[in-house]
Amino acid sequence: MVEVESTELSDVKIIRTKLFVDARGHFMETYNREAFAAAGIRDEFVQDNTSLSTAVGTIRGLHFQSAPFAQAKLVRVVRGRILDVAVDLRRSSPTYGQHVAVELTAENRLQLFIPVGFAHGFCTLEPNTEVAYKVTAHYSAAHDHGVAWNDQTLRIDWPVDPQRAILSDKDTRYPSLVELPDYFP
Ligand SMILES: Cc1cn([C@H]2C[C@H](O)[C@@H](COP(=O)(O)OP(=O)(O)O[C@H]3O[C@H](C)C(=O)[C@H](O)[C@H]3O)O2)c(=O)[nH]c1=O
């Protein structure tokens, strides 16, 4: 059983899947193609990724891949907690430049579906946070792009002092939204 809930950006969906609890612990189908399709998520995922961030206040993002390797993503937290953020980069969208931020945790077991046309990033809220996510196109370094995590026009309220955020060097060098080429016209 898969429950799909729209967010303020209607194409970004919060996914709940059934939890089976017994004396040993629990079981959950985190992805089932037929059940997700029945719930309206028909994207074909081709690659699974995981990342481990050891420190609180690690920010990974805001990333996306451009066509023909643009990716939809299905994100969940295996261990720890994140604030997961999706930014609408679709130039013709009425919500262009707007974002949603959803707390995904190993405890709430929520997943976030982020369609093609959005940048994705997260900030860890606990040490040793592991994030697992499915993507609908293979990695292509040449098509891997980003927008500045701290672009003030995005008004993302990251739960970390900007001076103390832990970032890759690459993530400190992305353009602002206004400087970004038009990848999703
Ligand atoms: C994404 C990716 C990366 N890599 C290699 C490239 C680098 O040598 C190394 C680390 O990559 P990166 O620093 O881009 O990893 P993250 O900063 O976690 O990036 C990811 O974080 C945000 C939140 C995302 O949504 C994207 O899926 C992805 O961009 O893994 C691969 O070999 N395959 C891949 O699919």
Image: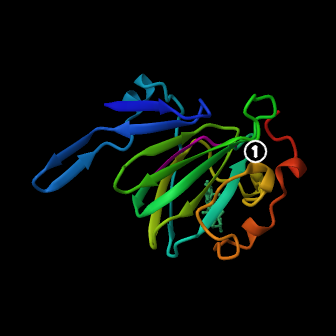
Secondary structure type for disc 1: loop
Residue 179 location (% of width, % of height): 90, 51
Q: Residue at x 72, y 59 (%)?
A: 149
Residue 156 location (% of width, % of height): 68, 53
**Residue 136 lies in the magenta-colored region:** no
Q: Is 107 drawn above or below residue 58 in the view shown?
A: above
Judge whether residue 105 can be spotted in this image.
yes
Q: Is 5 drawn above or below residue 106 in the view shown?
A: above
Q: Which residue is drawn at 63% across and 63% down?
A: 60
Left or right: 125 in relation to 24: right
Left or right: 185 in relation to 134: right
Residue 104 location (% of width, % of height): 46, 52
Q: Which amino acid does label 1 sit on?
A: Ser
Which residue has dot 1 on it? 66
Left or right: 60 in relation to 68: left
Q: Is 123 drawn above or below residue 55 in the view shown?
A: above
* Rendered-image quadrant of the N terminus: top left
Residue 145 location (% of width, % of height): 76, 54
Q: Nearer the viewer, residue 131 or 110?
A: 110
Q: Which of 28 and 96 is in front in this view?
A: 96
How crowded is the residue under tag 1: few (<14 C-alpha within 10 Å), some, or many (20+)?
Answer: some
Magenta extent: 70-76
